Structure formats: structure tokens, C-alpha cells
Image (cartoon, rainbow, N blue to C red):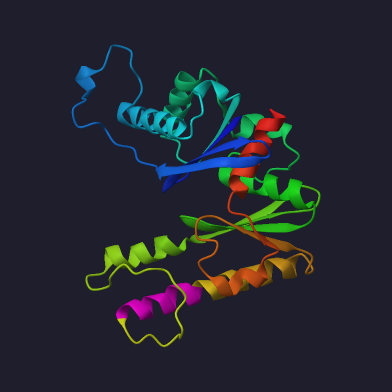
Amino acid sequence: MFLAVDAGNSDTVFGLYDQQQWRHVWRTRSLLEEPMAFHLSDRPFGDTDAVPAERDRYERLLRLWFLEANIPLSAIQSIVISSVVPELTPTLKTTLARLFGLEPVVVGPAIYHALPLQILRPYAIGTDLVANALAAHIRYKENCVVVDFGTALTFTTVSAAGQMLGVAIAPGLKTAVRSLFSTTAQLPEVPLVMPESALGTSTAHAIQAGVVLGYEGLVRSLLNRIRAELNGNCIAIATGGMATAIPTLEADFAAIVPNLTLDGIREVGLRV
């Protein structure tokens, strides 16, 4: 069994791969908090773990998930971590090593030489984008743009030869709505569903029209521009938690692959 860990800005996802499929996918918030009853002065001398509460929280969750799935911890044979939260990476690595007795592989520039990709600016690009590009390249072997509907809305383009050509980044749908909700006095947080009309007749409807319909145009416009720069020769793949939030975009994608990032993390594990 293989354990993939995708630590993002909002959530950390744990995927358990076995028998050619993702048997379990667990998700929790990516939080970095000091424990209420644990202070610097209480730590053993030499303890450099800045977030023991998070370390313990992840361990409790993993033990519970594996217990509920009736899977022994010893069944895990390899672990790969992709993290875009640098403060969280050591905590995850320490927790997983202690819990499973294995040294996790951390996706990053040190292992990129083993991948069939030419990485664009390896020290600057997010490891989740590398995982998306790797999975798409191995799966399709043609010019491809991966649209990841997460905390950020990202467009990662990889060539048929495995060269990462570029990335476009915009705020994610939920990020846009939360920004409105948190920085205005009278605008509520609303569900992200496709409105029937662009003419909002209530505050909630108006936000849905502006964000959901607006993002429909944003995604389609960027896809068209990317394809134009590649002479029209480029398929599009959607992934991420909000990949199906705008159903009118489904025809613009060759496929919607919810676990594409986990697929890429697993491909890393097969090569290092």
C-alpha cells in the first residue's frame, strides 16, 4: 500500500492507494496552532518541533482513519509528501516517520531529476503543480493544461515532450467568495451554485452571478488563450475540490480527474 500526502493551503489530503485504485481519501484542515496547554518552557530540551499540537492531531486522525478502515499501519510500504506549506512539512514528515516507521519522500527540487519532466523554475513552482503536470503527462502524452480548482485556481501547461511551459494563477472560487464575505460589512457568504441568470435579484444571487458566471468566463478565456499560443493543440483536464462547481465548463475539458494531484504524487513514489 502507498500513502500520498497533499498538504495545501486550506486542506491536507491523505490518499491510500492499493490494488490499482485510491481505496481511501481522507481530508482535514491544514492548521498550524500551538496547543492551549503546551508552552515553550514545557518542552523537553532540544525539542525543535514548532507545532507539537499539529503533530499529535495528525497522528490521532491517521490512527482513527486506519482503525475505521481496518488497515494495519504496517501495511503502508511507502509515503510521499507534497506540501506547499513549508511550516507544515517538518511536522508531517516527523509524524509519518514515527507512525509508520518509514522515511517519507518529500516532493521538491532534490528529486526532480528522477521525473520525466523538464521543470519550470524548480525552486519557485509549487510541488502540487509539478504533481499535476506529471500525472497529466504520463496519462495523456500530449500538450495538456491542468486546471486545478482549489484554494487557488491554477492553470499548469505541460507539453507532449514533458516540458512545463507555464502557469497561470487566480484566486479560487471559495477564496473569492470568502474575500467578499470577510472584507465587506453587508455581503453574506453564499453557496457556490450556478445561478439561472446573470441579473441578480438578491444579494446571494448577485454574488453567485458575479463569481460563478464570472469564473466561467475566466476559465474559458484563459483556456482559449493558452490553446491559441499552442496553435490549438492542447487538451484541458480539470481537478480539485471545486472542479464540478461550474457544470457549463464540463464540455471544455477532456476529463475531470478529482485525484489527479494524488496520482502525480504516486508517480513520484514510483520513480524515487
Q: Tell me the quarter of the picture where residue 226 sits.
A: bottom right
Which range is magenta? 203-214
Q: Magenta stretch containing residue 152, yes or no?
A: no
Q: Quadrant of the N terminus?
A: top right
Residue 11 on image: x %, y % = 43, 46
Q: Is residue 23 visible in this depiction of the protein?
A: yes
Q: Is residue 124 visible in this depiction of the protein?
A: no
Residue 229 on image: x %, y % = 74, 67
Q: Tell me the quarter of the picture where residue 179 sits.
A: bottom left
Establish if 96 lies above or below 6: above
Q: Nearer the viewer, residue 29 or 72?
A: 72
Q: Magenta stretch containing residue 212, yes or no?
A: yes
Q: Residue at x 62, y 39 (%)?
A: 265
Q: Residue at x 67, y 61 (%)?
A: 255
Q: Quadrant of the C terminus?
A: top right
Q: Tell me the quarter of the picture where residue 232 sits.
A: bottom right
Establish if 11 lies above or below 242: above
Q: Residue at x 35, y 62 (%)?
A: 178
Residue at far top of view: 45
Residue at far front of view: 70
Establish if 244 lies above or below 165: below
Residue 171 on image: x %, y % = 46, 61
Q: Nearer the viewer, residue 117 or 38?
A: 38
What main secondary structure does the magenta stretch of the protein show?
helix
Q: Report how many numbered discs are placed on residues in the image.
A: 0
Q: Residue at x 53, y 70 (%)?
A: 246
Q: Nearer the viewer, residue 71 or 15?
A: 71
